[in-house]
Image: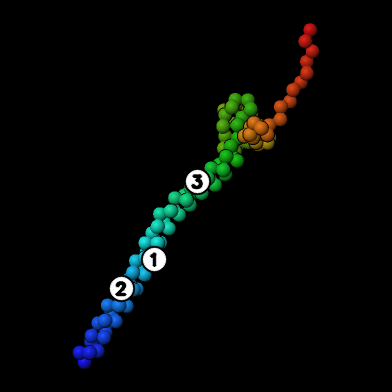
Amino acid sequence: MNKQLVIYFLMFLIVIPVFGFNFLFNLLGNILLLIFLVPLLILLTTLISFNSLKSKINICDQCGNISLGINNDCSRCGADLSDINSKNFEKFKKPSEATIEVKAEEIN
């Protein structure tokens, strides 16, 4: 009887720490993943929402008022903003991609 108790006690001392260390390593690994992945997911969500908001911005040609594209009329001067989307896209282009139109005039 005493011999079986010693064998069970030794098995308990060997088996429990192995599973305990495995659990501890898995727990620490998951915590480290959360520490690195949560800020990355927040940054990614912020960038996606910023790009979505940027595509909805309308700038009035007459007064320069910035609108979020909810209305078709400017809230400050009342100008029509329906065809401004294509014009605003050209304003956000890189300078190297822009086309400059030059008109020749005679000087007398």
Which residue in the rendered view is the most extreme toward the bottom?
1
User: At which x and y percent is residue 38?
Assistant: 44, 53
Closest to the observer, 9 or 30: 9
The relative height of residue 51 versus residue 24 in the rendered view (above or below) is above
Taking the view exactly as shown, the residue that stands out farthest to the left is 2
Q: Disc 2 on helix, strand or loop?
A: helix
Question: In the rendered image, is residue 91 in sight?
Answer: yes
Q: Residue at x 54, y 47 (%)?
A: 48
* Residue 13 quadrant: bottom left
Circle 1 or circle 2, nearest the eye: 2
Asked whether the beta carbons under mark 2 and mark 3 sit within 8 Å of each other, the answer is no
Label 1 belongs to which residue? 26
Labels in figure, total? 3
Secondary structure beneath dot 3 equals helix
Report the mark closest to the observer, 3 or 1: 1
Residue under pointer 3: 46
Label located before the other in sequence (3 or 1): 1
Left or right for 106, reference 79: right
105 lies above or below 75: above
Residue 43: image tag: none
Q: Which residue is mark 2?
A: 17
Kind of residue indicated by mark 1: Asn
Cα distance between the residues tagged 1 and 2: 14 Å
Q: Earlier in the sequence, mark 2 or mark 3?
A: 2
10 Å neighbourhood of mark 1: few (<14), some, or many (≥20)? Answer: few
Would you call the spot at circle 3 few (<14 residues within 10 Å), some (14-19), or many (20 or more)?
Answer: few
Q: Percent x, y for residue 27?
A: 37, 64
Which residue shows up at 26% across the image and 84% down it? 8
Residue 13 vs residue 61, the one in the foreground: 13
